Image (cartoon, rainbow, N blue to C red):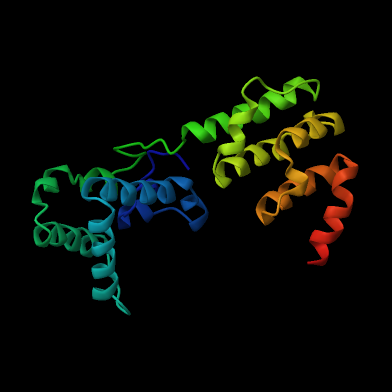
Amino acid sequence: MATDSGLSKLHPSLADMQNTTPDHAKSAVQYEKGFQLLHHLESLVGEKSFQKFLQSFITKYSQKSADAKDFTDTFEQHLKTANQTAFLPELDWNSWIYTSGAFPVKFDFSTTQSNISTDLAEQYSYLEGKSSPPDFAQLRSFSEPSKLIFLDQLRDNWGQLDRQALETIDNDYNFTESQDPKIKQRWLWLGLVLEYPPVFEKAHEFIRT
């Protein structure tokens, strides 16, 4: 579906729905735009205020139907109640909800850690296990989600790896001995696919538990 289609609006009109089928409405635009809108509102008023709004909205419309105007009216009323009316001029509902296309405000959810994790995985693939990337130690102190990004990147490109590469990675991070189930799931899969012997018994134990 084209991003300028009427069906890319968060709230399509009846005219937008004419001469179309449900298949034409399949697009990531609506889902991304809806998510981006909620994040935009939270970034304006703050997490605590936004959570209060969500609670009041859910309570107000529990077991009822609510449309886009109910949502916007309730949010604007929340700003008045919370003494945050200074944000009212920044609520471009028309662009977010009733206009075709992408987002009035685009957020980048990538982080420094996630970018480094992806880059490290690519470096291991390029080096083919002959050595470690110069800055490989950074990953050791990264959060679990960043380590999962690293492993997912390796898994997505497993055809560029071999047992020697896995041995180098394991020497650097000791993933084979990890007790984190999410890490184990990804690492053991890589080890089995690439026939890396140290994971064989660990994989049997993981399946039995």
Give the percent coordinates (x, y) of residue 132: 72, 23
Q: Residue at x 78, y 30 (%)?
A: 168
Quadrant assignment for the C terminus = bottom right
How many numbered marks have been drawn onto this rendered protein structure?
Answer: 0
Rendered image quadrant of residue 194: top right
Q: Nearer the viewer, residue 139 or 151?
A: 139
Q: Residue at x 18, y 63 (%)?
A: 74
Q: Nearer the viewer, residue 76 or 174?
A: 174
Q: Residue at x 23, y 62 (%)?
A: 53
Compared to 200, does 4 lie above or below? above
On the rendered structure, is 139 left or right of 160? Answer: left
On the rendered structure, is 163 left or right of 103? Answer: right
Give the percent coordinates (x, y) of residue 44: 23, 46
Compared to 132, does 28 lie above or below? below
Give the percent coordinates (x, y) of residue 197: 90, 43
| Residue lying at the far bottom of the rendered structure | 63
Rendered image quadrant of residue 139: top right
On the rendered structure, is 80 left or right of 39? Answer: left
Give the percent coordinates (x, y) of residue 131: 76, 21
